[in-house]
Image (spheres, helix red, strand yellow):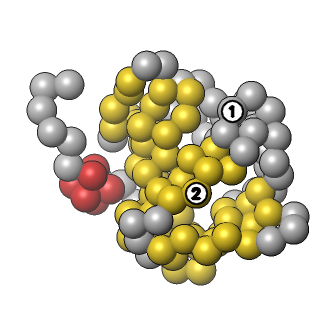
Amino acid sequence: MAGAVNLAAKLAGFADPWAPRTVAAFNGHDVMVVKVQGEFHWHSHAETDDFFLVLDGVLDIELRDRTVTLRAGELFVVPRGVEHRPVARGEAHLLLIEPTGTPNTGDPATAAPRRLA
């Protein structure tokens, strides 16, 4: 990396929800920003945990037995193999970290393509 990454500027560069943008990479992982709104799909990741950090807004992470509500500055890690569904009632901005190539839906056939911010 040539310099600091401004997350707000990266988020301002796109509008489409649920389409993560990679802003950095380290040790085989992608650091991504994403705008979310509404419900995502129920899914799980068999090979990796799922890291969510809310930068702005509110995100509910629905699990089959409870809901975890995150506000700006809060994070939650969904353990590998646990079915979950992120839900944002208004627009929320997130930072995600996951191994490079991890499909966001848990299924490569339905995953959003990786894009750079």
In this orientation, which residue lies closer to the viewer: 109 or 51? 51
Which three-letter amino acid code belongs to the residue tagged 1? Thr
Indicate the secondary structure of the residue bearing disc 1: loop
Residue at point 42% right, 37% down? 31
- Which residue in the protein does label 2 denote? 76
> What residue is shown at x 15% (from left), y 39% (from top)?
4
The Cα–Cα distance between marks 2 and 1, rounded to whole angstroms, is 14 Å
Relative image position of residue 67 (x, y in whole percent): 74, 72
Q: Quadrant of residue 69?
A: bottom right
Q: Secondary structure at mark 2?
A: strand
- 60 vs 27: above or below: below
Q: Which residue is mark 1?
A: 48
Precedes in sequence: disc 2 or disc 1:
1
Q: Residue drawn 82% across and 52% down?
A: 83
Q: Dot 1, crowdedness within 10 Å: few (<14), some or many (≥20)?
A: some
Quadrant for the N terminus, please.
top left
Q: Position of residue 7 (x, y in %)?
A: 27, 52
Looking at the picture, does residue 55 appear above or below residue 110? below
Q: Image quadrant of residue 105?
A: top right
Q: Position of residue 86 (x, y in %)?
A: 67, 63
Quadrant for the C terminus, please: top left
Figure disc tally: 2
Q: Is residue 96 above or below residue 113?
A: below
Say which of 93 and 63 sits in front. Answer: 63
- Residue 21 spot, x, y in % from top left: 42, 42
